[in-house]
Amino acid sequence: MKEELQLGYLVIGSTDPDAWDPFMRETLGLVPGPNDDGTRSYRMDAWQVRLQVQPAAYDDVAAVGIVAGTPTVFAETVDRLKDAGVALEHGDKALCATRRVADLVAFTAPGGVRVELAHSPRQAREPFNSPLVPGGFLTGTQGLGHAVLMVDDLDAARALWLDTLGFELSDSSFHETPSGESRALFLHCNRRHHSIALVQRPIRSDHPKKLLHFMIQANLMDPVGMAFDRALDAGLDIPRSLGRHPNDRMFSFYARTPAGFDYEFGWGAVEVGDNWQVAEYDHISAWGHRSLI
């Protein structure tokens, strides 16, 4: 099992960054990291940056940070992107300093999502400790969790993420939604069941977002229930209550972020091994995940 890449960080653009600070700290249980010119960082492990919120004219994902395990893997991945004809933008010193990485290149993936490929993230001096999340989060080589991206051309997105970046298919799903037909691919680049999922379906007028949701995973089960209570106490919309997925077996719930897309808080997902068998699913929940909106 290769573990050369991970979903290292997410950057969120916000018209109201102040609204994110209590959400990140008091609802998710993250710890504040460094701030740079209005860009706020949040920690969930030893890294200085796992999630960032930066001022923007929109409320959506600003960048998906894919972090290579070594400078060599970074260089090899950059070469594959160039060979595939992907237009690359080299991150300057200021951007690398804000992201707390040694180097990065950026490009636009199918669906209009900015992807930043980076390496050598900076480590924090202080150990991570969140009193709201006993046991902490499952990160390490598995990255911060996963991100589910909306795309309008699933085949083009698949070619970029699998053929060029080197992700592998975990499984897929196909089902009908109130908005129409939904097709999804779940992709891994390490032992996490999926670090990136690609979803193609009619975009609802009330949710024209590039990011459908992001997921963070606790190391223990009880913090999921504790986080669910905090979401209820905060009066957040709960589009999916506690439940379990059939593919990654994640026990989780979904609630709405200040940006209008969702976050998933979970525990207990299966991990991809060398003998993983790809499957297709026609449903997204084994049980639960009922809307409370």
Image (spheres, helix red, strand yellow):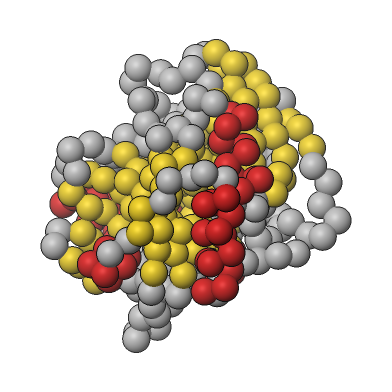
The one nearer the camera, 234 or 36, is 36
| Above or below: residue 293 compared with residue 86 | above
The residue lying furthest to the bottom in this view is 125
Instruction: Give coordinates of residue 104: x percent, y percent.
Output: 40, 63
x, y percent for residue 34: 24, 71
Residue ID at (75%, 64%) = 1
Q: Which image quarter holds the C terminus?
A: top left
Judge whether residue 268 can be spotted in this image.
no
Residue at x-position 73% and y-position 31%: 281
Q: Position of residue 229 (x, y in %)?
A: 41, 49
Left/right of residue 41 with respect to residue 128 in the rendered view: left
Q: How many marks?
A: 0
Q: Nearer the viewer, residue 124 or 102?
A: 102
> On the rendered structure, is 92 left or right of 105?
left
Q: In the figure, 220 relative to 107: above or below?
A: below
Q: Is residue 79 visible?
A: yes
With respect to residue 259, does 143 lie above or below?
Answer: below
